[in-house]
């Protein structure tokens, strides 16, 4: 499509330039300057031959002047109509290229984002990600398509105009080039400042998006803390900074127009003086040819102005490209080390064998973690906040790779399993419930697209969610709102549990899964959870004594190390960290 667009641009440039050359025989006929072949007495031979081979084939330029003028006008109308048809094709093809690039690039960036590991999302704010996926991709689209095709179009038009100007008068063409080099280099000293300014503008746009996203997601906290004034002040500071930075770059970029326009005026004045000398004093050029040359030269400066401003115009696109490719160049999570085996379940057990983990080099999160979970048993991970409990189960899902040791299932390193197969066999119900702006049915069936309505209902019954779902306005087709805002915390949690029930995974991870439930709902879900746990290997990250006591194995984690492991009774008799945590929570 881009090649076709360039071809159409070349055809447009040729037709556009020639439509002004055809003015020469028109003016020559009107002013009585017609020569032997229809051109004026001072028309160069090359132009005469071209006109005779085109206009002369349809119009008798040496015949009756009135008839010749009418014929030339009709020829110009046909030429302009053809030129506009080609221009329509060029515009349509260019639009297809632009939107195709935007679509493909957004899809590629979004697809790559889904493949990045969790550490990336811990480093980069959500607003910055959204800004790069929308605003920066748009800037890159402008660079790759609009500015690229604009530059090609300008070069083609410049070449076409220049060809006919040289044919009319090489001396006048040389005079026209006195100011063109100045227009091409005038922006040189400002480019570096523009690049810095555009980078800062895009970064600030991402910060504004991040602030909006954080405020909207935490609106309850904002209102409960009566922090509306504070948030307005913070947001106003960001937008004012963006405003000032944007205007600073606009001031630099806006200099292009006046400076270039002044230089074009100087060049036109030079051409008027020198051309008048050739027509009046030297009689080496006809008046009709001189007027045709001036029209072409006025069109010549348009692509020159565009190309002279191009370094300034492409700066936002270059900066946006840099920001987008920072994402595309970020390494995908463990795809290069993806295994070949399919994960079908646990028959013997799961072993953490001397596992170390560092999110950043030199800052250990886990050290020498070593324990065994028999198949079909329930292990509870307990310990102070920040001890590393969630990091341990994240290694099982391969959200992170251990920096030392290995996590094994039935003696096979989890890195030897295909990543999709491994995660398909893991069900996770976390304290932070994630629901999407979709129906209840779609949220329960998320990750199980082939599930029937009856299967969804069965899973909801196990999670004690069916009754309240049926009472919703549209039942299972009710839209839950963004992040499930139309539901209570307990309802959201039961839908998340139903989702795990529907997937029927052999390994289940419960991260304080009943924390958002009231007493009655917790009792019902605990009963459902007991049925759900049967026949599965379960990891429980829990703080409540009722959840911990029933575990087959309790692993106590403190400062990234396992300090105790055993049953509730044995650990209570042993004392230590577990006994201290239990006593604190009991009190």
Image: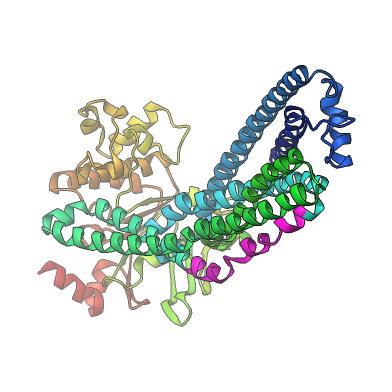
The one of 43 and 479 positioned closer to us in this rendering: 43
Q: Identify the image quadrant of residue 82.
A: top right
Q: Is residue 502 visible?
A: yes
What colour-coding does the image apply? rainbow
Q: Quadrant of the N terminus?
A: top right
Q: Is residue 211 left or right of residue 104?
A: left
Q: Is residue 25 left or right of residue 539?
A: right
* Residue 177 included in the magenta stretch of the image: yes
Q: Quadrant of the C terminus?
A: bottom left
From the image, give the main secondary structure of the stretch colored magenta: helix
Which residues lie in the magenta part? 172-196
For the image shown, how many numbered marks are present on the structure? 0
The one of 30 and 548 positioned closer to us in this rendering: 30
Residue 373's place in the image compared with 356, above or below, is: above
Residue in the picture at 62% in, 40% down:
97
Residue 8's place in the image compared with 530, above or below, is: above
Residue 411 position, x and y percent, is 56, 63
Residue in the picture at 89% in, 35% down:
49
The one of 412 and 340 positioned closer to us in this rendering: 340
Residue 540's place in the image compared with 110, above or below, is: below
Residue 36 position, x and y percent, is 90, 30
Residue 169 position, x and y percent, is 80, 49
Residue in the picture at 61% in, 32% down:
92
């Amino acid at each position: 499509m881009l090649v076709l667009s360039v071809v159409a641009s070349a055809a447009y440039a040729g037709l556009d330039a020639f439509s002004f050359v055809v003015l020469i025989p028109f003016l020559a006929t009107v002013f009585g300057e017609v020569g032997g072949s229809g051109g004026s007495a001072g028309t160069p031979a090359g132009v005469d031959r071209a006109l005779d081979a085109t206009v002369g084939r349809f119009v008798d330029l040496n015949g009756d002047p009135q008839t010749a003028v009418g014929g030339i006008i009709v020829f110009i109308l046909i030429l302009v109509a053809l030129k506009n048809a080609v221009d329509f094709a060029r515009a349509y093809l260019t639009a297809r290229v632009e939107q195709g690039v935007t679509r493909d690039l957004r899809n590629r960036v979004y697809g790559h984002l889904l493949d990045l590991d969790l550490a990336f999302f811990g480093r980069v704010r959500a607003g910055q990600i959204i800004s790069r996926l929308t605003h920066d991709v748009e800037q890159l689209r402008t660079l790759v398509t609009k500015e690229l095709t604009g530059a090609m179009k300008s070069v083609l038009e410049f070449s076409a105009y220049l060809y006919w100007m040289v044919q009319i008068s090489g001396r006048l063409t040389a005079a026209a080039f006195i100011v063109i080099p100045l227009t091409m280099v005038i922006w040189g000293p400002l480019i570096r400042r523009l690049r810095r300014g555009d980078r800062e503008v895009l970064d600030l746009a991402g910060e504004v998006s991040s602030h909006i996203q954080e405020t909207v997601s935490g609106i309850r906290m904002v209102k409960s803390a009566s922090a509306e004034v504070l948030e307005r002040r913070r947001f106003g500071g960001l937008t004012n900074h963006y405003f000032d930075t944007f205007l600073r770059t606009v001031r630099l970029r806006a200099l292009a127009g006046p400076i270039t326009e002044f230089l074009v005026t100087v060049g036109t004045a030079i051409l008027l003086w020198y051309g008048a000398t050739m027509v009046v004093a030297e009689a080496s050029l006809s008046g009709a040819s001189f007027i045709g040359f001036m029209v072409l030269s006025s069109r010549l400066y348009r692509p020159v102005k565009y190309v002279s401003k191009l370094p300034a115009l492409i700066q936002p696109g270059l900066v946006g490209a840099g920001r987008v490719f920072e994402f595309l160049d970020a390494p995908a999570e463990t795809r290069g080390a993806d295994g070949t085996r399919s994960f079908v379940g646990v028959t013997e057990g799961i072993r953490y064998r001397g596992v170390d983990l560092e999110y950043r080099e030199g800052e250990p999160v886990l050290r020498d973690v070593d324990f065994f979970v028999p198949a079909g048993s329930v292990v509870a991970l307990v310990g102070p906040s920040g001890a590393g409990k969630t990091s341990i189960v994240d290694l099982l899902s391969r959200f992170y790779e251990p920096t030392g040791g290995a996590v094994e299932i039935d003696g096979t390193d989890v890195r030897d399993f295909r990543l999709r197969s491994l995660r398909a066999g893991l069900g996770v119900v976390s304290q932070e419930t994630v629901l999407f702006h979709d129906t209840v049915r779609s949220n329960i069936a998320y990750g199980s697209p082939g599930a029937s309505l009856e299967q969804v209902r069965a899973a909801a019954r196990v999670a004690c969610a069916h009754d309240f779902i049926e009472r919703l306005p549209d039942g299972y087709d009710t839209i839950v709102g963004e992040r499930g805002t139309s539901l209570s915390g307990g309802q959201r949690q039961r839908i998340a549990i139903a989702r795990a029930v529907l997937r029927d995974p052999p390994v289940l991870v419960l991260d304080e899964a009943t924390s958002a439930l009231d007493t009655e709902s917790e009792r019902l879900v605990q009963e459902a959870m007991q049925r759900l746990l049967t026949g599965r290997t379960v990891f429980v990250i829990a703080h409540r004594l009722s959840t911990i006591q029933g575990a087959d194995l309790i692993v106590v984690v403190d400062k990234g190390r396992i300090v105790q492991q055993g049953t509730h009774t044995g650990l209570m008799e042993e004392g230590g960290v577990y006994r201290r945590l239990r006593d604190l929570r009991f009190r």
